[in-house]
Amino acid sequence: MPETTWHSLFPTLAAGDPATRALLAGALTLELPAQQAVFYAGSACPNYVLVLTGTIRVQIIGEHGREALLYRVLPGQACVLTTCCILSGDVYPAEAFTESRVKFLSLSKSVFDRALEDAPAFRRFVFANLGARIAQVITRMEELAFQPIERRLANLLLRRHGQTPASLLTATHQELAVELGTAREVVSRHLKRLEAAGVVKLGRATIEILDRQRLERNGFG
């Protein structure tokens, strides 16, 4: 991948000190296919990664094997759990999988540790990214713990609707359940309530939003 790619994705690093620029220029560029495990709960963290293309899904496994999405790592970002684990030496408390083909820069722990000492711009990026991403994870956990499933489902459908010009969303009930941290049966039950209320129309792995305003008001009234 051309050098300008990481320059554009990580402008603070590209504009940083010579040691930081040399660090990124010398990093390994690796790829993983879609649906590939990046790490598992209990595994060690040997490398710090910066995502260039693709998306990584980080999730936890709860009671009865239920999956719950924590966050996604997008191009121009680093994984907050990876940062925490490589700094602390702890093992991963969650798991991650690629959602598409992912290309990323990889720095070994020894290189990462030296860079924290010798590359000021890189050090600032690591801790700024860590702080911002931890705040996002806390917000996500608050949603899972305190926000009613009806509101979370409505917000998710609205968010997905905002990402596409079409009113027809492509998603299975299981995919939505993982996003919401609940069971597929719960999602199906609430979607059927929305359909009965005339807010959405359900198809095979599709959801058509018929009344966005009612969905913004939860859709269940």
Image (cartoon, helix red, strand yellow):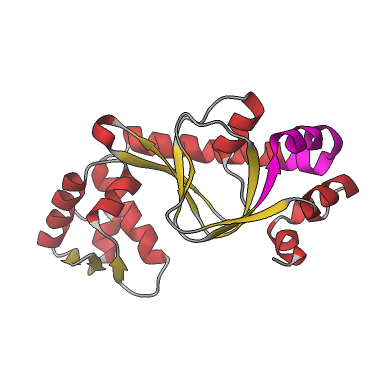
Q: Main secondary structure of the magenta part?
A: helix
x, y (%) of residue 184?
21, 47
The furthest residue to the left: 196
**Does any portion of residue 180 appear in the rendered image?**
yes
x, y (%) of residue 123?
77, 38
The residue that appears at 75% across and 56% down in the rendered structure is 11
**In the rendered image, which quarter is residue 145 located in?**
top left
145 or 219, which is in the foreground?
Answer: 145
**Does any portion of residue 221 appear in the rendered image?**
no
The furthest residue to the bottom: 166
Q: Is residue 185 left or right of residue 42?
A: left
The residue that appears at 22% across and 69% down in the rendered structure is 210
- Provide the residue span drawn in magenta: 105-125
204 or 24, which is in the foreground?
Answer: 24
**In the rendered image, which quarter is residue 207 located in?**
bottom left
x, y (%) of residue 156?
34, 54
Q: Is residue 35 left or right of residue 175?
A: right
Q: Which quarter shows the N terminus? A: bottom right
125 or 33, which is in the foreground?
Answer: 33
4 or 138, which is in the foreground?
Answer: 4
x, y (%) of residue 4?
75, 66
**In the rendered image, which quarter is residue 201 located in?**
bottom left
The residue that appears at 23% across and 64% down in the rendered structure is 205
The residue that appears at 16% across and 52% down in the rendered structure is 188
